Amino acid sequence: MNDGVVRTAERVLDLFQGARLTPTQRRIAHCLVEHAAKAAYLSAAEVAELAGVSQPSVTRFAMALGYSGYPALRRELRALSSDAPSEPAGQNTIQRAVLAETEHLRRLADDLHRLDDVRAAAALLAASRPLPVLGLRAAAPLAGYFGYFASKVFPDVRVLDTGGTGLQDRLDQARAAGAGAMLAIVLPRYPRESVEAVREAKAAGFAVVAITDSAVSPIADTADVVLPAAVGTQLVFDLHTGPMAMAMVLLEAMCDAAPEAVQSRLEEFEASATRRNVFVV
C-alpha cells in the first residue's frame, strides 16, 4: 500500500473501533479495510462477493455500526476517502511513518475519554493470583515489558512468551494455582497459537483481557474485555507504540484498583533495590 491508501485504510478501520462484531461481520470489516482504496465505490453485492458472505449480511453489518443501511455506510466511506490529507511537503517516508504514530496516539487518547473498559479490565487482572500474561512472536517483547513492571507491584506475574506444547501446561498450572484472569496481547499477524490459547483459556474458566490492534481482531469476540490500539504499518515491520501505551495505561489502572497494596510493594522493592545497589541512580 502507498501512504495515501494506508491512511484511508486506517480511517476505515476507525469506523469499527469499539464495535462488537460477529465473526461474519468481522470478515466484512477486514474486506473493507483490505480494499480501502475502492471500498467507497463498491455495491453491497460486490462487498458480499469479496468477503464471501450474503448481501443481507452486509446490510446487517452496516446497521450494527449504527447506519440506516449499506448506502449510508458507503457515503461515510466516500467522505473518509475524499477527506484523506495530502502528502506533507518535504517529509520523507521515515518521517511520515513516525508522525503517523502521533496520530495513533491522538486517536487512542480520544478513545480513552471513557475509561470503563480499562477499569473493568484492570479489576479483573488486579484480582488474579497468579497473573498470566500471554504474548507470542511480535507481541512477546510487549508481554515482557508489561510483565517486568507489573511484577514490581503484583505477586506472581507469569509471562507466557513461548508457544509449543508447553504453553497449555503453563496455562493449566496458572489456573490450578488460582488464576482467574489472563492478559492476552495479540498483534498482527495474529499467531494461530495465540488465538487458540485465548480460546483454551476461556474454556478453562479464565476471564480474558485482550490488547490487540482493532475491534475486528480475530480474538475480539472471544475476550471478555478488548482494549484496541492501532499498530503502525508504514515501515517494513509494524510499530507498536499504541499497544505499548495501552499496556501502560492498563497497568496504571491496575495500580489504581489496589493503591495500598501497590504502594507497599513499591516501597519493599525500592528498599531491596537500594540494599542490593541495583541501580546507578
Image (tube, grey):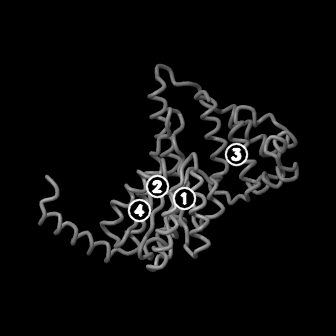
Q: Which mark is nearer the camera, 1 or 4?
A: 4
Q: Position of residue 179 (x, y in %)?
A: 47, 76
Q: Which mark is nearer the camera, 2 or 4?
A: 4
Q: Amino acid at mark 2?
A: Met
Identity of the residue drawn at 41% across and 74% down: 130
Q: Position of residue 44 (x, y in %)?
A: 85, 43
Identity of the residue drawn at 54% across and 61% down: 210
Q: Residue 192, relative to residue 171: is it above or below?
A: above
Q: Earlier in the sequence, mark 4 or mark 3?
A: 3
Contact flag, marks 1 and 4 (Cβ < 8 Å)? no
147 on left or right of 53: left
The dot on residue 246 is 2
- Which image quadrant: the N terminus? top right
Q: What residue is shown with label 4?
A: 159
25 on left or right of 83: right
Q: Position of residue 176 (x, y in %)?
A: 47, 79
Q: What residue is shown with label 3?
A: 30
Q: What residue is shown with label 1?
A: 227
For the residue labelled by badge 3, is the local secondary structure a helix, a strand or a loop?
helix
Q: CA distance from mark 2 to mark 4?
A: 17 Å
Q: Earlier in the sequence, mark 1 or mark 3?
A: 3
